[in-house]
Image (tube, rainbow, N blue to C red):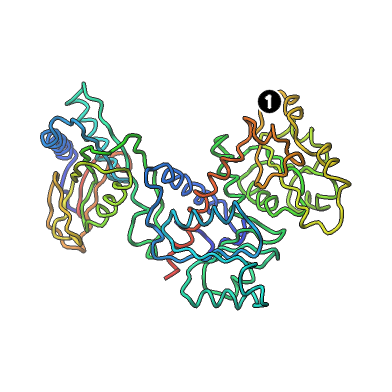
Amino acid sequence: MKLSTKHLLGIKDLSKEDINLILSTAEQFKEVLQRPVKKVPSLRDITIVNLFYENSTRTRMSFELAEKRLSADVLNFAASSSSAAKGETLLDTVNNILSMKVDMVVMRHSASGAPHFLAKHIPAAIVNAGDGINEHPTQALLDAFSMKEKLGRIEGLKVAIIGDIMHSRVALSNLYLLKKMGAEVLVVGPPTLIPTYIGEALGVRVTYNLQEALKWCDVANVLRIQLERQNQPLFSSLREYNLAYGIKRSNLDSLGKEIVIMHPGPINRGVELDSDVADGKSSIILNQVENGVAVRMAVLYLLAGRDDNQ
Amino acid sequence: MKTILSEQQIALTVKRLAHQIVENNQGLIDTVIIGLQPRGVFLSDRIVDELKQMTPALPIKYGKLDITFYRDDVRKALHIANATEIPFSIEGKKVVLIDDVLYTGRTIRAALDALLDFGRPSKVSLCVLIDRRFSRELPIQPDFSGKAIDTIVSDKVKVNWAETAEKDEVVIV
């Protein structure tokens, strides 16, 4: 058994079997992370470069830790402190790095499709760590892993994705994954932040009413408002957004049931999530971060171990 | 196809191996049993059942170890991991590793690396059902062996277990 793809560019390209293989392998890595020595020698002869053209705390540290726990050699690249600032093209930068015998590229870029472009031109395996407003596949995989860990299944779950659907690569990757795994999905947000034809295009339900969504769902995956990607105002103020779509303790208390709260981070406290919800007992936000390392170990292990790498 | 061990013979061999383990570990004091995933566990399950009957007063510490992430051939072939369950400390303990067939010795090499990541045992010994003693690629030998066979490399030794086949049986294909 192996993955059907050479790269992890997006959830869109994965089959249900691929997703199950990654999740079950991640379970074994999660056990490794509980051991006295939290490290295995699997990727001892593999070199990985983390190519970050966009800022990141969680994802970059999570990938770096996953690589180190697998005993890979790790190179870090941040665009702001490199020759990219002198005008070197993406392809030139990567070819220069690969000529130093690097096996895998983990890449984040603000342009949608940047890793897909690289995959056509270089021989190394590529893992997309977020490209523009397209996909963030490892986030969707760790979200799925965390949901499954908390609730025991993904199939048949009712998941509400709440907030800035328009600019969120986390939302798109989650939508693809949840549909493939047989969950029901509802997207919620102000009309200006939900793409017009998303319902027809991806087979999801759309609502503009937060409370209706919370009543319906088992899991609320709350997204960050991405002000850096909005070049025109799409709602009047953060305060107004919080009043209409921010999740507060009172929203949850009136439901009469427990729902699971997730957030990919970083949280804008007091905007999409109030602090007592983000830190409350229904929140699995820090479990998501913990699981991220195991899931990324699984992805790197499965891509490095494809036998056509020879 | 030639039968090397029948169902009855395997049952006797399992009993003998269990007795040898008790005899060589002072009645299992400070001893833990670890079966190797996936197929060594079928043998270790049977041996642990015997041990429980022999020393009913003593709770037996029994774990399962998967060595997939410690293999030396990641680039040659992808292996899918099984569960590792070692819910106790092995620090200072006498560990008995159990696998079904000892062949090249590479699995045991990986198992020793994996085991040491859980702590520092005072001693590790190895128990196998079948020892293909002329096919070793590393200097590793069993302490307790069900049956040694002198096959050539091209022979295929198959251990069937009732959990996945009709019955317990060892054959040469």
Q: Quadrant of residue A279?
A: top right
Name the foreground residue: A47 vs B84.
A47
Name the foreground residue: B77 vs A223.
A223
User: Disc 1 residue type?
Assistant: Lys
> At numbered mark 1, what does the secondary structure look like: helix, strand or loop?
loop
Q: Residues within 10 Å of mark 1 (few under 14, many from 20)?
A: few
Taking the spot 54% from the left edge, 38% from the top edge, the residue there is: A149
Taking the spot 22% from the left edge, 27% from the top edge, the residue there is: B52
In the drawing, does residue A234 fall left or right of residue A82?
right
Q: Position of residue A16 (x, y in %)?
A: 57, 51
Q: Is residue A60 above or below residue A100?
A: above
Q: Position of residue B91 (x, y in %)?
A: 27, 39
Taking the spot 35% from the left edge, 35% from the top edge, the residue there is: B87
Residue at the far right in the pictured view = A236
Q: Which residue is mark 1?
A: A257
Q: Quadrant of the C terminus of chain B?
A: bottom left
Name the foreground residue: A131 vs A38.
A38
**Total labels drawn:** 1
Q: Position of residue A150 (x, y in %)?
A: 56, 35
Q: Is residue A117 above or below residue B35?
A: below
Q: Quadrant of the N terminus of chain B?
A: bottom left
Q: Is residue B135 above or below residue B90?
A: below
Name the chain under label 1.
A
Q: Position of residue A31 (x, y in %)?
A: 43, 43
Residue at the far front in the pictured view = A81
Q: Quadrant of residue A68?
A: bottom left
Q: Quadrant of residue A163?
A: top right
Taking the spot 61% from the left edge, 63% from the top edge, the residue there is: A52
Q: Is residue A270 above or below residue B156?
A: above
